[in-house]
DNA sequence: GTTCCTGCAAAATTTTTGCATCAGT
DNA sequence: ACTGATGCAAAAATTTTGCAGGAAC
C-alpha cells in the first residue's frame, strides 16, 4: 500500500512545459527540477538548497523559492504543509497519479500512500458541496508500525 | 453538508482540563480559550491577537502563541496549515465531532464540512497501513459555488 | 543585444525565547 | 510567599523582494 512515486519523465516534462511557457533554461531552476525529479516524496526549500550545495551545484536560496513558486503555479509541483510550519514540495504527475501522506508522530517519518476509493470519495464530496475541485490533500497522523512495535518492548 | 461546529461547552471543558493539569487560570490564556470557544472555524494567531485587542482584552502575542501551543499539546485545539504559510487553530471537540475544510482558490473562503463515510474510510486506511492513527486532516481546494456562478456571467 | 534569470543582501512575516514583573493559588 | 503566567522586546526561522551582474536566446 505504501508506494513510491513513479518518477518516469517528470523532469523532462517539467522542463519542456517551462520552455513552452517561454521560460529560459536557467541553471538554478533546472537544478531544482532535476533534483525534484529524483524524489519519491516531498522536500523543503532548505533541503533542496542543502542537497544542491552538497552536490556542488550551488544556487541561491531565493532561486529555489522562485523556481518552486513558478512550478507550483504551473501545477507541476504540489506544495504541502504537513505540520512543523515548513512548506514541502514534490513533483505533481500529469497522469493523475496522486498520493497522500502519513506522518509518524514519534519518529517524524513521512510515508506515502494511495487509494483510489479515497480519491473517488473526495471527488464525490466536492460535487455534493457544489465546489469545482482543483485538488485535495490528505494527511494522516499517528504512530508508524516501527514505532508501534518498539513500544511493545 | 456544510455545518457549523458544535460549540457547546468546549470552553468550559478546556478550562477545566487546563486546571486539572495544574495550570493557573491566567488572563491571557483564558481570553484565548474563550475566543476560540465562540468560533465556528479556524483562526490564525494574529487574528486572535487582533480580535482580543479589538475587544479591549489586550494580550501579548507571545501569550497567544504559548496558549495555542499548550492547547495543541493537550489536543484541545487542532492546528491546521491550509496554505498561505500561516497556521490556523480551532477547537478540537471531545465527542469525536470532526470536520474538514474546503478552501476556495478564488475568494479564499474557508468552509467546513463533515462526512462520516470519509472518516470511516480514513480509519480503515490507517489500519491497512499498519499505523495507529491519532488524527487526520483533509483539505479540498477548488472554486466555491459563489465564485463558480460569478464565472458564468 | 535584449530580456530573463540568478545570487546576494536586505526586508517582511511568522513564530519562539529571555527576562523582569505580575498574578493565581 | 511561591511559582507559574504574562508582556515586551529581541531573536530565530522561513519566505519574499530589490537590484546589479550574468546568462540564455
Image: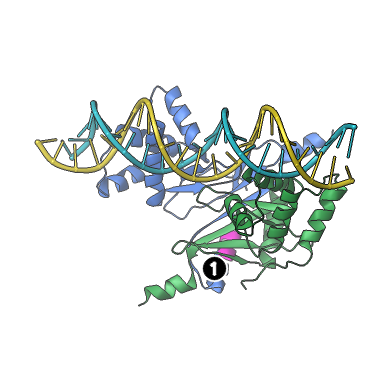
Chain colours: A green, B blue, C cyan, D yellow
> Which image quarter: residue A112?
bottom right
Q: Position of residue B22 (x, y in %)?
A: 24, 47
Assign the C terminus of chain B to one quadrant of the image. Answer: top right
Q: Position of residue A77 (x, y in %)?
A: 71, 53
Query: Does the magenta segment cover residue B121?
Result: yes
Front residue (pair B15, A38)? A38
> Which image quarter: residue A90?
bottom right
Q: Position of residue B91 (x, y in %)?
A: 45, 45
Label 1 element class: helix
Q: Main secondary structure of the magenta part?
A: helix
Count of picture labels: 1
B135 relative to C2 in the view: left or right: left
Look at 63% across and 46% down and name the residue there.
B102
Q: Position of residue B134 (x, y in %)?
A: 46, 61
Look at 51% across and 44% down and name the residue there.
B5
Q: Can residue B8 be seen in the rendering of this structure? A: no
Q: Can residue A13 be seen in the rendering of this structure? A: yes
Look at 49% across and 52% down and name the residue there.
B97
Front residue (pair B23, D14)? D14
Instruction: Determine which residue is flagged by label 1.
Output: B126
Q: Which residues are magenta?
A: B118-122
Query: Does the magenta segment cover residue A98?
Result: no
Look at 43% across and 39% down and name the residue there.
B37
A17 relative to B144 in the view: left or right: right
Amino acid at each position: 500500500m505504501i508506494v513510491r512515486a513513479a518518477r518516469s519523465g517528470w523532469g523532462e516534462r517539467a522542463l519542456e512545459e517551462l520552455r513552452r511557457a517561454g521560460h529560459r533554461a536557467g541553471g538554478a531552476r533546472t537544478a531544482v527540477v532535476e533534483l525534484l525529479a529524483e524524489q519519491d516524496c516531498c522536500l523543503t526549500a532548505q533541503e533542496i538548497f542543502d542537497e544542491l550545495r552538497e552536490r556542488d551545484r550551488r544556487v541561491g536560496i531565493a532561486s529555489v523559492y522562485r523556481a518552486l513558486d513558478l512550478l507550483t503555479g504551473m501545477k507541476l509541483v504540489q506544495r504541502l504543509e504537513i505540520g512543523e510550519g515548513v512548506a514541502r514540495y514534490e513533483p505533481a504527475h500529469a497522469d493523475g497519479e496522486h498520493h497522500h501522506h502519513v506522518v509518524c508522530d514519534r519518529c517524524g517519518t513521512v510515508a506515502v500512500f494511495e487509494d483510489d476509493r479515497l480519491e473517488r470519495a473526495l471527488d464525490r464530496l466536492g460535487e455534493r458541496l457544489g465546489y469545482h475541485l482543483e485538488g485535495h490533500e490528505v494527511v494522516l497522523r499517528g504512530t508508524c508500525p516501527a514505532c508501534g512495535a518498539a513500544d511493545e518492548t
